[in-house]
Image: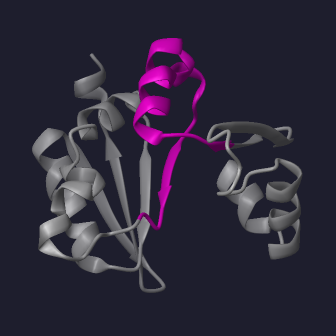
Amino acid sequence: RIARELTSWTDDELDDSIEEAKIDKEDSNRQHVQRVRDNVILVRAELVHFWRLWWQSGLVEKTEQHYMLYPNPYPKKSRLKQRWYAHPSFPLLLLVTGGKPLILRTNWRQYAQEFADAVTYAGAYEDVTEDGVSSVTMNASKLAQ
């Protein structure tokens, strides 16, 4: 539902919402939360901490779906540990899904495959390619138990 809502926004609407939420890189307060629609909340936070707090809060049960839209793939081998599937917080990401789908969208096929391999190691996934965009859907219900 949220993805459908976000994709229906024009660039101007999204820019206005972000501006309204006062989310900018120069702001000294690095964490922001702003409800911009009934079912959309823009959050700017340190993701590793956000995932941990989301898990601890119990809000995982109320989350319908989790999206990672075009994460930075850090293509150089020397930056491998900065890719989400190689980051120490990856197991936390799997827990935060709460056994519900995680959709990864990327235009870098290698990143999608490596992410899928990491998820396969931890659980099950389905790889779907549409319009040249790869989506990795995973279910981490085994980890959530």
**The C terminus appears in which quarter of the rendering?**
top left
Quarter location, residue 122? top left
* Segment colored magenta: 43-71
Quarter location, residue 6? bottom right
Residue 70, x across and y down, in percent: 46, 68
Which residue corresponds to the image point at 21% horizontal and 48% vertical from the top-left? Answer: 119
Which residue is more in the foreground, 125 or 63?
Answer: 63
Residue 31, x across and y down, in percent: 63, 37
Residue 28 to residue 143: above or below: below
Which residue is more in the foreground, 89 or 132?
Answer: 89
Which residue corresponds to the image point at 28% horizontal and 78% vertical from the top-left? Answer: 109
Quarter location, residue 9? bottom right
Which residue is more in the foreground, 129 or 80?
Answer: 80
| Residue 22 shown left or right of residue 57 in the figure | right
Which residue corresponds to the image point at 53% horizontal and 20% vertical from the top-left? Answer: 61
Residue 65, x across and y down, in percent: 53, 41
**Does residue 104 belong to the magenta stretch?**
no
Residue 35, x across and y down, in percent: 81, 38
Total tally of numbered discs in the picture: 0
The answer to whether residue 1 is seen in the rendering is no
Residue closest to the far bottom: 132
